[in-house]
Image (cartoon, rainbow, N blue to C red):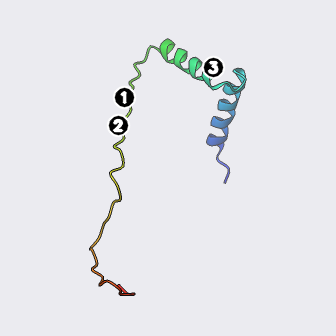
């Protein structure tokens, strides 16, 4: 499926990246400069903390199995 809006966004993005030889740091700096020049207020939030994994997450009912049994 061809979407003309998506195609246009991709063309603009590629042209912008080409201006900076596809250097992500330079692209990022340009975007930040454009934000400053716009006069708009941009909000950023601190990254969310990721809780360390606390072991296996067992859900559901527990099943009791007799020792030596081959079936559940």
Taking the spot 36% from the left edge, 41% from the top edge, the residue there is 50
Mark-to-mark CA distance, 3 and 2: 28 Å
Quarter-wise, where is residue 17 in the image?
A: top right
| Image mark for residue 49 | 2
Q: CA distance from mark 1 to mark 3?
A: 23 Å
Q: Which mark is residue 26?
A: 3
Relative side of 56 to 39, left or right: left
Viewer-side residue, 64 vs 68:
68
Residue at (32, 64) in percent of width and height: 58
Instruction: Please tell me whether residue 38 is drawn above or below residue 61 in the rendered image.
Output: above
Tag 2 near tag 1, CB within 8 Å? no
Residue highlighted by disc 1: 46
| Secondary structure of residue under mark 1 | loop
Residue 46 image point, x, y percent: 36, 28
Residue 3 drawn at (x, y percent): 64, 47
- Separation (CA) of disc 2 from disc 1: 9 Å
CB atoms at circles 3 and 2 under 8 Å apart?
no
**Closest to the observer: 47 or 32?**
47
Question: Could you tell which of marks 1 and 3 lies nearer the N-terminus?
Answer: 3
**In this view, the mark in front (2 or 1):** 2
What is the secondary structure assignment of the residue under circle 3? helix
- Secondary structure beneath disc 2? loop
* Left or right of 39 in this view: 51: left
The C terminus appears in which quarter of the rendering?
A: bottom left
Quadrant for the N terminus, please: bottom right
58 lies above or below 10: below
Q: In the rendering, at what x and y percent does residue 56 appear?
A: 35, 59
**Decide: marks 1, 3 in contact (CB < 8 A)?**
no
| Residue that extends furthest to the front in the rendered view of this protein | 68
């Amino acid at each position: 499926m061809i979407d003309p809006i998506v195609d246009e966004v991709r063309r603009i993005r590629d042209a912008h990246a080409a201006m900076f030889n596809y250097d992500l740091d330079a692209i990022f700096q340009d975007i930040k400069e454009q934000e400053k020049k716009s006069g708009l207020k941009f909000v950023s939030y601190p990254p969310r903390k990721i809780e360390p994994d606390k072991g296996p997450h067992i859900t559901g009912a527990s099943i009791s199995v007799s020792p030596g049994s081959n079936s559940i």
